[in-house]
Amino acid sequence: MRLDKYLKVSRLAKRRSEAHEALVNGRITRDGRALKPGYDVKVGDVLELHYARKYLTVRVLHVPERVTPGLRNVELYEVLAERRDEPADWLG
């Protein structure tokens, strides 16, 4: 499954276009390298997502064959680390 679609299905991004934009701008990485929207997600991948004020590191647990309503109860990823950046931290 394409990474932009996986982010939408797993609810790590609200919309696929939002996931696509984050990927194009290099805000989602694996092993320190920016990923492209067409990257083929695999079980075990550790992804780092940079939101506006939050960094999230997740491990992919399951990649669905197709999108179905039954995916709501399936754990698609586990959160390994989460960090928030507050505007006050930017001042140094």
Image (tube, rainbow, N blue to C red):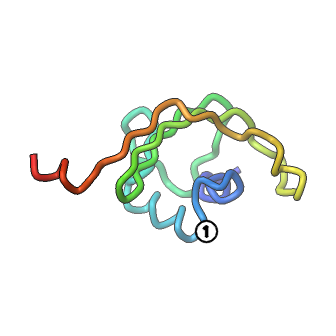
> Residue 15 appears at what percent x and percent y?
61, 68
Which quadrant would the C terminus be assigned to in this image?
Answer: top left
Q: Residue at x 37, y 36 (%)?
A: 32
Question: Would residue 80 appear left or right of 67 to someone viewing this image?
Answer: left
Question: Would residue 65 appear left or right of 55 to someone viewing this image?
Answer: right
Give the residue at the far left of this rendering: 92
Question: Would residue 14 appear left or right of 89 to someone viewing this image?
Answer: right
Depth check: 44 or 11 in front? Answer: 11
Depth check: 54 or 34 in front? Answer: 54
| Secondary element at image label 1 | loop
Q: Residues within 10 Å of mark 1 (few under 14, many from 20)?
A: some
Q: Which residue is mark 1?
A: 15
Q: Residue at x 59, y 53 (%)?
A: 12
> Residue 23 appears at what percent x and percent y?
46, 57
Q: Residue at x 48, y 37 (%)?
A: 57
> Residue 87 appears at what percent x and percent y?
23, 56
Depth check: 31 or 57 in front? Answer: 57
42 vs 4: above or below: above
Q: Residue at x 38, y 40 (%)?
A: 83
Depth check: 6 or 36 in front? Answer: 6
Task: Place residue 79 in its image quadrant.
Answer: top right
Q: Amino acid at mark 1?
A: Arg
Question: Would residue 50 appear left or right of 12 to someone viewing this image?
Answer: left
Image mark count: 1
